[in-house]
Image (spheres, helix red, strand yellow):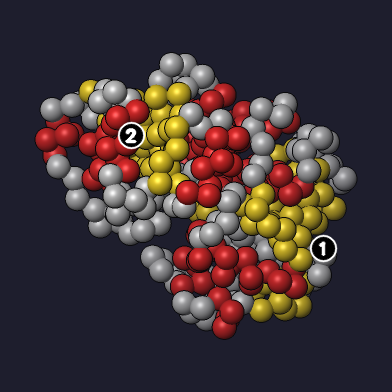
Amino acid sequence: MKAAVFREYSSDPLQVVKIEDVDLPELKPNEVMVRIEAASYNYNDIWAIRGEPTKVPMPHISGSDAAGVVTEVGEEVKRLKVGDRVVSHSNMSCRLCGACMSGREFDCPERKIWGFETGPLWGGFSQFTHLPETNVLGVQDNVAFNDAAAVSMAGLTVWHALVGRAGIHPGQVVLVMGGRSGVGSIGIQIAKLFGCDVITTVGSDDQEGKCRELGADFVVNHRREGWSAKIREYTKKKGVDVIFEHVGMTHFPQEVMLLKMGGTLVTSGATTGYDSRIDLRFLFFRGTNLLGATQGSMAELQALMHWVGRGKIKAVVDTVLPFSSVVEGHVMMIKGKQFGKIITTPQKL
């Protein structure tokens, strides 16, 4: 089969990521084989290529979002069958510890992110992959493979952050940072689904219209001076209830100051860096809640895909690349100019 493989680290994906012929993986009794029709890019693909902040198994196939068709099932597989349309659940856990047994697979001490920490040669940027049955979810017939791949990891991350961790509810004011990103574009929709007043930020003014189409009530350019003051003005100096944060170091201090008394900031990333400072007075005087969130449970993925199937949450796809151009997607991720997700189609060279 064909796969996008790199065998050394580099700051330039064009130098190391190559389409190679690799052996079809061997199936374990509890696994299914999936013919991948669509795979979506995430920033952890860039971290893997760079080897920072963590080293990954080599040789490496990246890709934590994949959707396709089951072509083979192991002898212990009970729930899925050949021909089923499926999407990956990239949070791989032991399923036996206290966290897993209580539905918190994301807190499993043995957790690994498929397509990032797995390998060698085990990720979504390939024509076929193998996954445990417990890490595969059926996809409704009315959901396209591109759309399923676009929402599975990004959508799950923000669902877990906003619904599972922050517990958003109708009437709240929710700030979604980076509305043009994969997680941001889904975050706007989830917050609106729950009846919230949604503020989002963008990196350029031309992205405002698309964010409003997704449901944002107020949009501000976070690269302009005084962006946080504009949000304060919009909220009539009351502040916001919940912030979904993934930008990181450059904006974190201002975000904390935007929270109202008892407000919640939930973070799932640090694209601009992780070494940030905050004024602790905003933490203890206001009773601020600072929460971390990564990935999510299978139950949360099921909830997300239910609403995707109902058309209430829509995948936002910027670009679809043939597999021969797979490395171009990595370059696009680094430049960060896309609105929504980038998809590659491994069956279409």
Residue 216 screen position, x and y as percent? 51, 32
- Residue 178, relative to residue 265: is it above or below? below
Quadrant that contains the N terminus: bottom right
Q: In this view of the protein, which residue sits in the foreground, 266 or 232?
A: 232
Residue 231, numbered label: 2
Residue shown at 14% from the left, 30% from the top = 284
Most extreme residue toward the bottom, as rendered?
A: 15
Residue 9 screen position, x and y as percent? 49, 78
Residue 143, numbered label: none
Drawn side of residue 257 relative to residue 248, left or right: left
Crowd tier of the residue under label 1, counting other residues whose Cα lies within 10 Å: few below 14, some 14–19, many 20 or above: some
Residue 176 screen position, x and y as percent? 44, 37
Amino acid type at circle 1 is Gln
Q: Which residue is mark 1?
A: 347
Question: Distance from label 2 to label 1 (Cα)?
Answer: 45 Å
Q: In this view of the protein, which residue sits in the foreground, 11 or 9?
A: 11
Drawn side of residue 98 relative to residue 79, left or right: left
C-beta proximity under 8 Å, tags 2 and 1:
no
Disc number lying in front (2 or 1): 2
Provide the secondary structure element on which disc 1 rests: loop
